[in-house]
Amino acid sequence: MKTWLTETFSIQYPIIMAPMFLVSNKEMLFAAAEAGITGCAPALNWRTPEDFEEAMKDLKENCPGPFGINLIVNKSNVHLDRQLEICEKYPPAYVITSLGSPEKTIKKLKPVGVKVICDVVDVEYTKKVESLGADAVIAVNSGAGGHAGPIAASILVPMLQKNTKLPVISAGGVGTGAGLLSVLALGAEGVSIGSPFIACNESGVNDDYKQAVVDYGAKDIAMTTKISGTPCTVIKTPYVEKIGTEQNFIESFLNSNKKVKKYAKMLTYYKGTKLLEKAAFSATYKSVWCAGPSIEFIDKKEKAGDIVKRIIDEYDEAYKKLKERNES
């Protein structure tokens, strides 16, 4: 299973434990490293730059393997400059950039040895980040949780490979070993897996959120614009069904009006993230939980390392069956 991802970061398996807003934490990054993969966490999961710096110092000193940090690189992240300074002081193995231009991140962090990997959903943006000096891309496909891309992995991965020299890592839809094998067969250098780890023991979210990941499946995932104004995947709980997944007339009007669109989107995002934060850490009837369709393959709460072991065991079995089929 040697790929660009395993060779670059000296990990055993080509898997990134994906950064998940409000979910990822230090304990998950430690568990990922111990399981032979690498974990990534959003810098914004630490509510202040001071908390983030303290966490980075701890991770640099004590994490048994490589870890990454996810940075929101558009204007909505008012802490970006400070987060970049902290990453320069305590360099992670890599940074994954989302929702904006990675130019500043690349100029700031590549000189200190940080690999910069960029979220992309199409060829146009992939070519742009390649020209800026990105080291690899995360191909966010239609099976991803959170802000999913519009194109299936079976199309997106080979499409990007055809149009870029950058290593392509697939994000979305993988929760089994057979899924991992299929994405690697497409030519991906690894996978980014998030939703299956929401229910792991190391995750800091409440038990109701974890139990929802266990109880619900792929058919229960809905796309909503109510959280950030941009389509986002959530678990279709009774509350989500009650409030609906589309913005009401007033919300839709404000988000499309040229004069107030910017401020309406900021308000929608603020309200949505506060709703997610409350749901993640305190159970109420009005819970909205982000997740992707790969929760289909989670049927219990367990250690992150056990999830990795299951996926790798399934991979070995799927590879063995494929080999036997080809030899028969």
Image: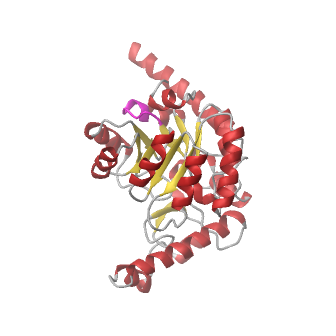
Q: Is residue 45 magenta?
A: no
Quadrant assignment for the C terminus: top left
Q: Nearer the viewer, residue 18 or 197?
A: 18
Using the image, determine if residue 276 lies above or below residue 108. below
Q: Which of 50 and 277 is in front in this view?
A: 50
How many discs appear? 0
In the image, is 113 to the left or to the right of 57? left
The dominant secondary structure in magenta is: loop
Residue stretch in magenta:
183-190
In the image, residue 187 lies at what x, y percent? 37, 32
In the image, residue 49 lies at what x, y percent? 63, 60
In the image, is 61 to the left or to the right of 91? right
Q: Nearer the viewer, residue 272 or 76?
A: 76
Q: Is residue 314 visible?
A: yes
In the image, residue 262 lies at what x, y percent? 40, 77
Q: Which residue is drawn at 38% across and 53% down?
A: 103
Using the image, determine if residue 133 lies above or below residue 8. below
In the image, residue 304 lies at what x, y percent? 67, 41
Say which quarter of the image contains residue 30. Answer: top right
Say which quarter of the image contains residue 79. Answer: bottom right
Q: Which residue is drawn at 43% across and 42% down?
A: 170
